Image: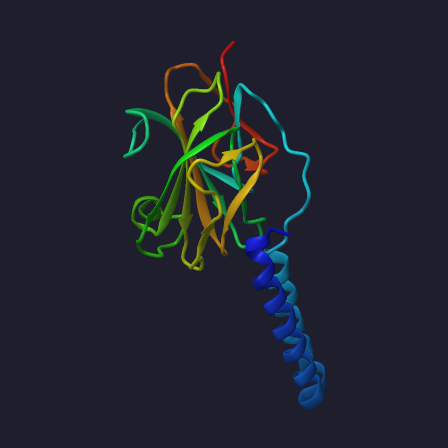
Amino acid sequence: MARYALIEVTLIALLGLAATVLAWWYWEWWAVLPLLLTAALLAFYRDPPRRCMIRADAIIAPADGTIMSVEANVAGRQGEAKEVLRICIFLSVLNVHINRSPCSGEVREVRYHPGKYLNALSSEATVQNEANELILMPDSPLPGPIVVRQIAGLLARRIVCAAKVGERLTCGERFGMIKLGSQTQVSVPNDGQWRVLVKVGDAVRGGLTILAERNS
């Protein structure tokens, strides 16, 4: 269990237990409702152990979810290359919400952007919603910077990023999470040397699924 989720999990478990006992005392079988709600919330915070894929010539999915878009020739935002390959992952409330580094490298910058809480499936959410950007300078031979953007959704009201400027992350290492439904994007400099291995609609797993690799 990631340390930034441990307090929330403990609080949910204690409050859920108290609510279940209280409901059983007064209403007996109605106690199943707070019990199910507590189980659902605890499932959201799950952090299954994984032997992450480590590839020096590839980027790995930074989150579990479904590929929402793959854009090859996008104008980069501040802190990105002039032109980027951007892959967006949608996380439903059923997905594991831990975010992982898509590559090994050094954290150069962490930027928070306040914003709205539109439905994470909408294209407007990508630009207008609350977000946090992690800028990584990857190890060779990957070009940099590589940017991971955590985007809040309709239900997600808190983005957690534990990575600090100057810290080194290994490929697949946990660095944060987004509470409830959301998006996670990864953007890499588009120098024409990438081979994308996923398409819209594909299910991916953080730290395990290769999104794109360098051409030999």
From this view, report whether residue 129 is shown above or below residue 57.
below
Foreground residue among 114 and 109:
109
How far across and down, in percent of the image, does residue 104 sit? Answer: 53, 28
Residue 72 in sight: no
Q: Is residue 54 visible?
A: yes
Residue 138 in percent (x, y) is at 46, 25
Q: Is 179 situated left or right of 116 in this image?
A: right
Instruction: Name which residue lies at 41% across and 54% down.
Output: 153
Q: Position of residue 106 (x, y in %)?
A: 46, 31
Residue sitting nearer the eye, 78 or 38: 78
Q: How is the image coloured?
A: rainbow
Q: Residue at x 30, y 54 (%)?
A: 115
Where residue 183 appears, x then y in whole percent? Answer: 44, 45
Describe residue 54's horizontal placement relative to residue 112 as left or right: right
Horizontal placement of 169 versus 1: left or right? left
Residue lying farthest to the front in this orientation: 166
Residue 21 drawn above or below residue 139: below
Classify residue 24 by image quadrant. bottom right
The part of the image, by quadrant, that contains residue 20 is: bottom right
Q: Quadrant of residue 133?
A: top left
As drawn, the residue found furthest toward the top would be 216
Query: Count of labels shown?
Result: 0
